[in-house]
């Protein structure tokens, strides 16, 4: 028999704690109903999901597969672009791309019923957790997350988790090449302008002259926004030196229209008027011959 996969489910849910609506991120081992990671978050987005997953990976290692729904955070529901088709690639969300770099398989559920154990587990949390927080006198997010980590998760697992059929831990350790700061981040591409500037998130960045790799204008640069908010520029696996600028420097007309500048500078431009030039439509009129004017003295 082959090795069985141990599947872990990730879920984002809305939770109401003392009349304040927040989000909840949780990772559960579905086979034995064991909660591995849980926390309250302000917004249900990719960055908060990556933060929760990063803490989970640092403690447990890499799972074989993650079972998720078809939310846009996990799956992009659109057709591949022309560039993606040429690369024989499918459109990936930031989280799915990061899991692929870590060697974690993504399994997408086709219905809510397919994730029944996780859904029932969240219903249990929504019933018991709110009461536990009220009994503990907790009404802010920081204290609630500390309560989850130190008290609630261990208590919940001790009451509801079941013994697995096999005690083999299917988690794999993180490798030295798995630098989580560089993987669990938002990655987008930008084209370097002729003046070695680029724009990202309404901010401008100037690539400096001294670099460890040769880079030219019109090259495609990867912009990484790490979970801490810092911006990093990468080209062919090498991070670039750059500086922030408030606005783009002035660029004249011929700087942005180099084709016309080359034509003017080479002297190869033609002076023959175009076919629709007004000069070609001008037809000179024939004037009648003028009669000589006789003076009064001659008469």
Image (cartoon, rainbow, N blue to C red):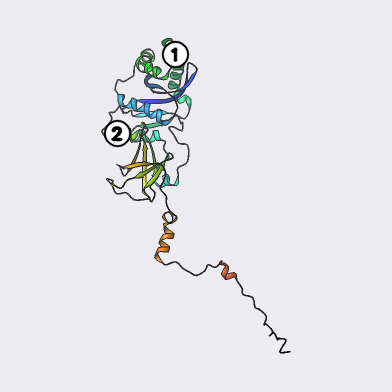
Q: Secondary structure at mark 1?
A: helix
Q: Secondary structure at mark 2?
A: loop
Task: Name the mark on residue 179.
Answer: 2
Is residue 141 visible in the rendered structure shown here? yes
Task: Name the mark on residue 26.
Answer: none
Please tell me which residue is depicted at 32% across the width and 45% down the height of the picture.
208
Q: Residue furthest right?
A: 299
Q: Of label 2 and label 1, which has the lower sequence position?
A: 1
The image quarter containing residue 23 is top left
Number of numbered discs on residues = 2
Q: Residue furthest front?
A: 297
- On the image, the x and y values in percent for residue 197 come to 38, 46
- On the image, the x and y values in percent for residue 205 come to 37, 42
> In which quadrant of the rendered image does the N terminus lie?
top left
Q: Residue furthest top?
A: 135
> In which quadrant of the rendered image does the C terminus lie?
bottom right
- On the image, the x and y values in percent for residue 280 come to 57, 70
The image quarter containing residue 158 is top left
Front residue (pair 36, 247):
247
- On the image, the x and y values in percent for residue 91 come to 43, 39
Is residue 170 visible in the rendered structure shown here? no
The correct choice, above or below, for 272 with respect to 159 in the image is below
Q: Residue furthest bottom?
A: 298
Q: Are marks 2 and 1 in contact (CB under 8 Å)?
A: no
How many other residues sit within 10 Å of disc 2, few (<14), some (14-19) or many (≥20)?
Answer: few
The image quarter containing residue 161 is top left
Task: Name the mark on residue 128.
Answer: 1
């Amino acid at each position: 028999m082959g090795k069985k996969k141990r599947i872990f489910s990730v879920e984002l849910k809305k939770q109401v704690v003392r009349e304040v609506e927040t989000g909840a991120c949780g990772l559960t081992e579905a086979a034995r109903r064991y909660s591995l990671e849980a926390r309250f978050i302000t917004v249900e987005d990719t960055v908060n999901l990556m933060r929760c997953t990063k803490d989970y990976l640092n403690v447990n290692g890499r799972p074989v597969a993650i079972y998720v729904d078809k939310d846009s955070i996990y799956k992009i529901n659109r057709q591949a672009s022309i560039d993606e088709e040429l690369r024989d690639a499918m459109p990936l969300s930031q989280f799915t791309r990061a899991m692929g770099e870590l060697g974690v398989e993504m399994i997408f559920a086709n219905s809510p019923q397919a994730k029944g154990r996780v859904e029932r587990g969240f219903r249990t949390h929504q019933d018991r957790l709110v009461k536990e927080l009220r009994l503990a006198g907790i009404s802010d997010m920081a204290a609630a997350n500390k309560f989850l980590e130190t008290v609630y998760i261990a208590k919940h697992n001790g009451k509801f988790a079941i013994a697995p059929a096999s005690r083999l831990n299917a988690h794999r350790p993180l490798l030295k090449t798995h630098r989580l700061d560089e993987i669990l981040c938002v990655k987008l591409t930008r084209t370097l302008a002729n003046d070695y500037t680029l724009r990202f998130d309404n901010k401008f960045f100037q690539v400096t002259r001294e670099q460890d790799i040769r880079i030219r204008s019109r090259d495609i640069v990867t912009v990484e926004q790490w979970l801490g908010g810092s911006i990093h520029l990468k080209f062919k696996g090498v991070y670039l030196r750059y500086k922030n600028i408030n606005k783009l420097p002035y660029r004249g007309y011929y700087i942005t229209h180099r084709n016309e500048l080359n034509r003017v500078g080479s002297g190869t431009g033609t002076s023959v008027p175009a076919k629709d030039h007004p000069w070609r439509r001008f037809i000179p009129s024939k004037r009648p011959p003028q009669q000589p004017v006789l003076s009064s003295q001659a008469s």
